[in-house]
Amino acid sequence: MLPDRDTVPKETYPVLVLGALGVVYGDIGTSPIYAFREALHAASTDGALLRADVLGIVSMIFWALTLIVTVKYVLFVLRADNDGEGGILSLMALARESYKTRPRLILGIGIVGASLFYGDAVITPAISVLSAIEGLEIVTPAFTPYVVPITITILLTLFSVQRYGTARMAFFFGPITLVWFLALGFFGLWHLFDDLSVLAAVNPHYGFDYIVRNQGTAFATIGTVFLAVTGAEALYADLGHFGRRPIATAWMWIVFPCLLLNYFGQGAFVLAHAESAKNPFFEMFPPWALLPMVLLATAATVIASQAVISGAYSLSRQAVQLNLLPRLHIAHTSEKQSGQVYLPRVNFLLGLVVVLLVIGFERSTNLAAAYGIAVTGNMLVTTTLLFIVMTRIWKWQLWVAALTTACFLIIDITFVGANLIKVIDGGWASLLVAVLIVLIMSTWVKGSRQLQRKVAQGDVPLELISRNLTRSPPTIVPGTAVFLTGNPKGTPTALLHSLKHYNVLHERNVILNVVTAPSPTVGKSDRMHVEPVNDRFMQVTLTFGYMERPNVPRTLAIFKTAGWKFDIMTTSFFLARRSLKASPRSEMPYWQDKLFIALARSASDATEYFQIPTGRVVEIGTQVTI
């Protein structure tokens, strides 16, 4: 049995459905601009395009949308929520939590999936906006030299306004995308009557027949057909923002029907006008609708790009909380919605890579060769983790879970194989981004563990220090000292250095450990754990979910436990700032040590990350060789 914990108030349901249209379906909703076109180009590499070829392509697109999006994601993946949250890292945390030992293999699978998402995130804005602007060439060929400059201008503008947040823009996303889908459906239905025989493509026979007849080009065509489902992973990534039912409703009642009408309409149009196979999406519009549709397509692709960019921010925040990346500066751009975040460094790197891709590839057709590999890999990772959820959390019988997963794997592996042939033609771009992210995340995870072990070797038990200080107390000064540490049982380095150099101890001393739970949020009862050591010391553990931003002072102020009334004006926070040096006896290669040290230096300040007032912080430097 599949779990269903999704409950949505009736009064907010239409708003959530409309919001899901603008955020969740922006990417897959712009695929008709280029997906069918690229499939036709792949099928006609020998110079001929037969009627059976067109029907075969439409059939493959129909069944890809049905099996991958409707069956796999809507019926299965959307139910694999982690306390309401979705996304590849949420799925990884959910699967990993089902094991007591927290296997590193599952962590590695999650890292690969997250890295592939970044590879997709840099391609989507480039190909979406570029393909929309190329519609101007249909209006008049005079626009051809200006396609790339206009695209870059739009993208630079998009990335430059991210610092202001997406809350205001999101208000318009849903209505504009709704108009876009209705326009797709309307013009698709209009041209469906050009050749109603295209409806025969619902029969999967035409897809299989194409593959059998065109063994030389079939694999390349399957790779381009997959462009029709790129963006399907957004259904799961944005689960926490809208809930399963609104996302499923938007798909079944609006997105899916409109996409099918448009693809079948394009197929009928090409059957009746074979000369229009070069760019059927824009050529199917009458002259009076062409320019408005180019403008609407541009708006839709900007919205699709915005959705991917926001998804990259959310994924990066989760990665930081799960300690897969160093601390990054996270700015909250909305007082009402915690999910509205902006990460300057991520924004800059994304924008830089996207612009370079537009300059390097120049045409959306060229970018199509780079598109799809990262998405197929991400879907394969999702299927793998879903099997663990089926067997260990949903408690399915092994043979049922294996049979279901095998069906998904056959589809995923077929598309992965079909897209691998694109590597030389441009697929290396998204794979290169993914490999770099895997390298960064794996280095950070491995280096952090090595550093933790190194620091733990020199730790002095807190219990021993507290007993010695009770027998021969140093100078006692008024106020409270909070020492942040990763090992609550050991004596913080900042405390040892303070005693060594100043021989001073505060009246109250808190050994504070901040941990991240494998769940997106944490209830109030699990937020704070206090364990008194003696009259001078207490151990405090604050737990935050991976979707929450830690605010240490506010959390300490809420909880009045152990007789301690927290007052920020009489409290000092002590942090140890480590200076790292590479050791020739390190467990990692020298170059990886250097990379870890560089990542550690680039991390945002702990004071800012934990939202501690700078005027209440004392930093003590230490040197550690790893």
Image (cartoon, rainbow, N blue to C red):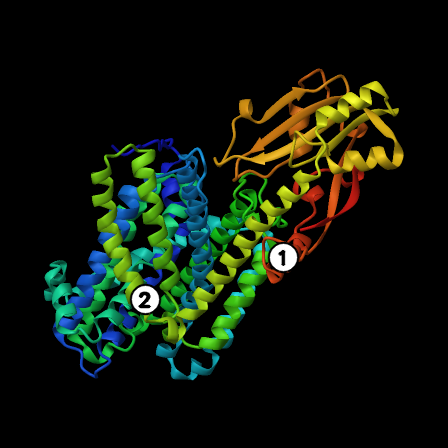
Q: Residue at x 45, y 36 (%)?
A: 101
Residue 324 percent across, percent down from the top left: 54, 48
Q: Nearer the viewer, residue 307 or 43?
A: 43
Residue beneath disc 1: 593
Nearest to the eye among marks 2 and 1: give it.
1
Left or right: 417 in relation to 268 = right
Q: Nearer the viewer, residue 138 or 452?
A: 452
Residue beneath disc 2: 419
- Work out which residue is located at the far front of the displayed protein and give it: 585
Question: Which quarter of the figure has residue 401?
Answer: top left
Mark 1: which secondary structure? helix
Q: Note whether 103 is above or below 24 in the view shown.
A: above
Q: Residues within 10 Å of mark 2 (few under 14, many from 20)?
A: many
Left or right: 259 in relation to 157 = left
Residue 212 percent across, percent down from the top left: 13, 69
Left or right: 508 in relation to 530 = right
Question: Which quarter of the figure has residue 189?
Answer: bottom left
